[in-house]
Image (cartoon, rainbow, N blue to C red):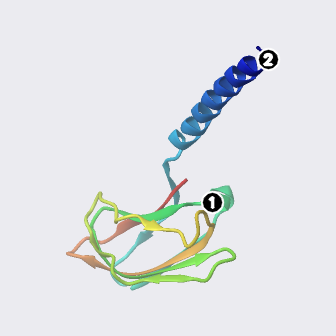
Amino acid sequence: MKVRSLVASLAVASVVLMGAVGSARAADQWFLLGEQTIKPVDQGVTIKSEGGRWAKDVKQMRIGVEGADVEIKKVILNWDNRPDSTITDFGVVKAGGKSVPRDAPARKARLQAVTVEYKIVGTAPTAKLQIWGFD
């Protein structure tokens, strides 16, 4: 009788634990790490860590653009306690759109800064470059 009671208790505990893990995964979401206005006369920008947003571990990152289409030529991701990553195949990000997500070098990592070499496509005077993280 005690064994059945113990098995039933373990079954209930495992269901509760699985529910907690599932709800933790549901909390994963994209959040804005930082943004900066860019101009056609500049060819690159470094967005450095600011405040507590950058202290958060990320599983993936992506770049968003508002105001104009932007050709992303090169991105250097400066990770905390990880080697820097260089990405050269971003392509053009349309105004109001976001790039394809890129994985962090480990399951989770912290970005210290992101350097982006770009070219604004067209005649727009400015665009807004956004760095997004997924946790």
Gap in angstroms between the C-alphas marked 1 and 2: 44 Å
Residue tagged by mark 1? 57
Residue at x 54% of width, y 43% of height: 25
Q: In the picture shown, does residue 50 fall above or below 75?
A: above
Residue 2 is labelled as 2
Q: Is disc 2 placed on a helix, strand or loop?
A: helix
Residue at the extreme top: 1
Q: Is residue 26 above or below residue 10?
A: below
Q: Is residue 30 left or right of residue 126?
A: right
In percent of width and height, residue 130 lies at: 44, 63
- Amino acid bearing label 2: Lys
Residue at 59% over, 35% down: 18
State the image coordinates of residue 30 (x, y, percent, origin top left).
47, 51
Q: Is residue 106 visible?
A: yes
Q: Would you identify the image quadrant in which residue 96 lies?
A: bottom left
- Residue at position x 37%, y 84% from top? 88
- Horizontal side of residue 30 vs 106, given as left or right: left
| Camera-side residue of 19 and 129 | 19
Residue at the left extreme of this rendering: 122
Look at 79% across and 17% down and name the residue there. Answer: 2
Residue 130 can be seen in this image: no
Nearer to us: label 1 or label 2: 2
